[in-house]
Amino acid sequence: MGIDRRKRGFSVSGKLSRKEFGLTWDAVTEAGNIVVSDEVRINAEIQIVRQS
């Protein structure tokens, strides 16, 4: 059985700082917990299938 050359897949992950994009809004609950974090994590699993 050979390699299927019609399919490709890859994973992407990373993180961004909201402040680097000028997003500085934050909120704090009555207990003192932060509602919105500065760090945004991105994870993606991508598969591409070439049609014949």
Image (tube, helix red, strand yellow):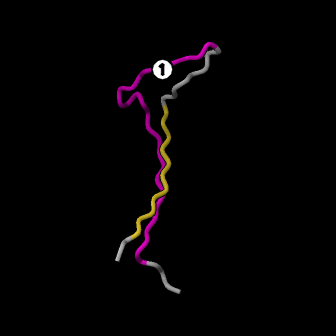
Q: Position of residue 5 (x, y in %)?
A: 41, 77
Q: Is residue 46 above or below residue 15?
A: below
Q: Is residue 46 magenta?
A: no
Tell me which segment is drawn in magenta: 5-30
Residue extending furthest toward the front: 52
Number of on-image labels: 1
Q: Residue at x 43, y 21 (%)?
A: 25
Q: Residue at x 41, y 22 (%)?
A: 24
Q: Position of residue 42 (x, y in %)?
A: 48, 44
Q: Is residue 29 above or below residue 5?
A: above
Which quadrant of the structure image shows residue 51? bottom left
Position of residue 30 in the picture relative to residue 2 (left or right):
right
Would you name the residue on which mark 1 appears? 26
Q: Position of residue 2 (x, y in %)?
A: 49, 85
Which quadrant would the C terminus be assigned to in this image?
A: bottom left
Q: Residue at x 43, y 68 (%)?
A: 8
Q: Position of residue 35 (x, y in %)?
A: 55, 24
Residue type for callout 1 = Asp
Q: Is residue 6 above or below residue 42?
A: below
Give the crowd class for mark 1: few <14, some 14-19, many >=20 residues within 10 Å: few
Q: Is residue 14 magenta?
A: yes
Q: Secondary structure beneath disc 1?
A: loop
Comparing 42 with 51, the one in front is 51
